[in-house]
Image (tube, helix red, strand yellow):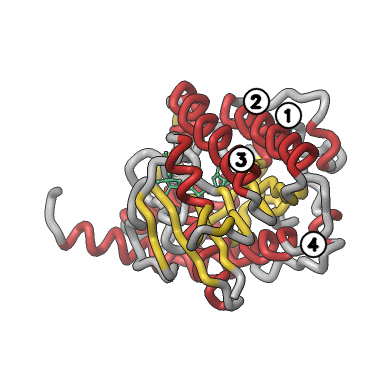
Amino acid sequence: MKKAVVCGAGGFIGGHLVARLKREGFWVRGVDIKAHEFRKSEADEFKLLDLREPGNCAAAVMVDGKPADEVYQLAADMGGMGFIHTAECEIMHNSMLINVHMCRAAAQAGVGRYFFSSSACVYRDMRSDEPDITEDDAYPAMPDNEYGWEKLYAERMAKAYQRHSGMVVRIARFQNCYGPFGTWQGGREKAPAAISRKVAEAADGGVIDVWGDGTAMRVYTYVDDLIDGIYRLMHSDMECPVNIGSDERVSVDDLVAAVAAVAGKRIKIKHVEGPVGVAARNHSSARIRSLGWVCQHSLREGLAKTYPWVAEQVRRKRGKGPN
Ligand code: NAD
């Protein structure tokens, strides 16, 4: 039985990845600094470790005295635009330490395959009418935020370890991902979860605040589609970084309309000041498609699986009273 380690298994995408690897027949160890907030881990073993510490990284990648066959590195100090714009130092410090130590520990231990979760934030700001950006267009580099710079550095480090240690490295650049079991409140939530929460809290005909003027163009990828891309990429011979994201491009206002439609509510938008991020990032998905990947969920279909989960969290919180 192949042994996989998922770092960041207490988080949104890591939790879904553990479930997929179990379905594929792997023995799985989850690692995170905290337990999952919303689901019981399906991992065979779950270790609480702070991966900023090199000794913990070395312990994470060894299973029964042998290096894991596959390591998926998704642990990061992570959040939506609000978090990315305010917690720049924490992101640069914490995520960098995790990546520096995890990559080295995996290479030194002799791990077979190493997956790194990068982001579309490595790309520059774009106009929505510009031609699609390919993975090679990450250079000359001009990410619009520190989170993107940290990802770019970590990508390069992982590739350097591949060149010098022989560890196979696979890198995906995720577009925004959404789905059930993700952060939906507290400041780290991303737009689909935040808008779902606001719509769930609003009455029919109510008004919700939306950061910016609502015209920023975005790609939202349902988590099962993203996980399928990760799995295909990890087991492919694709040496270069690969974008994973839906081809459906929508404005932030379109996202609100889609959530409202799924919720069956009439919602009015009040545009307010707030961190918006780039105007657009038109990624090419040719590489991931060349691995047979197809995005199975439209935004509407993904939200139909996500909104009810967020609405349920909102109902439960209300039931608990003012706290
Ligand atoms: P998440 O915040 O839900 O998961 C990250 C996990 O890392 C958390 O459970 C957190 O506790 C853990 N972590 C943080 N610091 C740690 C430490 N010191 N030691 C051990 N664990 C630690 O985020 P996510 O949305 O599941 O994202 C997973 C990965 O995908 C991240 O690397 C993120 O940057 C990347 N990514 C996500 C998106 C998205 O839309 N969600 C987009 C692009 C890239």
Q: Closer to the camera, 89 or 194?
A: 89
Task: Please name the residue that numbered disc 3 is placed on.
Answer: 103
Residue 134 seen in this snapshot = yes
- The residue at the point 47 percent across, 36 percent down is 54
* Of callouts 1 and 4, the N-terminal one: 1
Query: Reading the chain from its start, which is encountered first: label 1 or label 2?
Result: 1
Q: Secondary structure at mark 1?
A: loop
The residue drawn where x is 54% and y is 48% is 74
* Amino acid of disc 3: Cys
- Compare residues 192 and 241 and report the one nearer the observer: 241
Q: Which residue is mark 2?
A: 144
Question: Which marked residue is nearer to the observer: mark 3 or mark 1?
Answer: 3
Residue in the foreground of this view, choosing between 48 and 204: 48
The answer for how far apart the CA atoms under marks 3 and 1 are is: 26 Å
Question: Which is nearer the N-term, disc 2 or disc 3?
Answer: 3
- In the drawing, does residue 234 fall left or right of residue 258? right
Residue of label 4: 236
The amino acid sitting under disc 4 is Ser
- Residue 81: x %, y % from top left: 50, 35
